[in-house]
Amino acid sequence: MKIGFIGLGNMGGPMAANLVKAGHAVTGFDLTAPMPEGVTRAATAAEAATDAEVVITMLPNGAILRSVAAEVIPAMTAGAVLCDCSTVDVDSARAVADQAQAAGLGALDAPVSGGVGGATNGTLTFMAGGADAAFATVKPLFDIMGQKAVHCGASGAGQAAKICNNMILGVTMIATCEAFALADKLGLDRQKMFDVVSTSSGYSWTMNAYCPAPGVGPASPADNGYKPGFAAELMLKDLNLSQQAAVSADADTPMGQLAAELYRRFVEDEAGRGMDFSAMLPRFERRGRA
Ligand code: NAD
């Protein structure tokens, strides 16, 4: 397939590399990032999109997605599919899909879960919103870049699934970390805490698979000085997107709101930027109630 790929950073670079390895012809454009081996560099985003059957974008945020989409949509051939894999706000995802469809293109929002490791190993999970035909066109590419692709519904449904999942993740990580910090102050051994909770009703992905306590549970960023993994500022981005969506949809999300505020303080005021999002545990450890 002829593929245009725009945004070849930490995630997009390895995703494009996997498409090349599978035999696809990939033309890429990025403002700064180098092209992975086998990706042809285009001079502009529009050039990368010209004649492509599928254009994939992997960009930092909704404003950048909107400006890139305004440039590439007129350059694309009718019937081609614009597939955005970035994590962006639901409103931007829907606006870009509307523009693409008005131009006779297919459109998908297909954010991913799995991080840089998943992008490199081709084991991402894609959650897609858009029409059946567009999903069917891109599905073989999802199968190369990932291990699972869920068609969640109409445009915006992929982003909705992503931010709801990550709102649960952020809230659960905070709950797990504050419980460990309380257990410490009650004199409970961390390994015993893990042994009980991981097999009791408090279990969760954050406890069982990504334990924030060093030396306890399976290997996780906590065992590596809290080097990310999934950086606290990316969690903050996703929590802010969930709150933006909650305001827009008039949904009551008090725990998500508090999680966003705690990660905002952690990233902006408490030296959490550049740390894994599980570094909330040492943050709680250092604090008392005040
Ligand atoms: P990144 O900053 O490494 O990559 C983004 C790339 O976009 C950069 O190389 C940048 O130069 C390029 N770019 C910016 N503006 C551009 C423009 N106008 N035209 C062309 N290229 C442009 O970020 P990333 O970690 O690869 O994340 C990309 C997206 O994936 C984000 O939306 C992020 O939230 C999401 N995501 C990231 C992770 C992760 O673990 N890193 C996990 C899941 C989802």
Image (cartoon, rainbow, N blue to C red):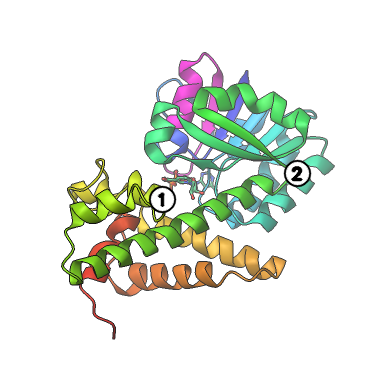
- Is residue 219 at least partly visible in the picture? yes
Image location (x, y in percent) of residue 131: 77, 36
Residue positioned 63% across, 71% down in the render: 252
Q: Residue 154 carries which label?
A: 2
- Dot 1 corresponds to which residue? 204
Please provide percent x and percent y for residue 200: 37, 51
Q: Where residue 111 is drawn, which disc sits there?
A: none
* Image quadrant assignment for residue 11: top left
Q: Nearer the viewer, residue 195 or 159?
A: 195
Relative placement, left or right, of 173 versus 103 is left
In magenta, the rendered stretch is 14-32
Q: The disc labelled 2 sits on which kind of residue?
A: Ala
Spatial CA distance of label 2 from label 1 is 29 Å
Q: Which of 95 and 227 is in front in this view?
A: 227
Label 1 is placed on what type of residue? Ser
Horizontal and vertical percent position of residue 282:
22, 64
Local packing at callout 2 (Cα closer than 10 Å; few below 14, some 14-19, many 20+) is some
Whether residue 53 sits left or right of residue 165 in the image: it is: right
Q: What kind of element bears circle 2?
A: loop
> How many numbered marks, from 0 up?
2
Can the viewer see residue 47?
A: no
Q: In this view, does 197 lie above or below 147?
A: below
Q: Is residue 203 left or right of residue 45?
A: left
- Residue 73, quarter of picture: top right
> 214 or 187: which is nearer to us?
187
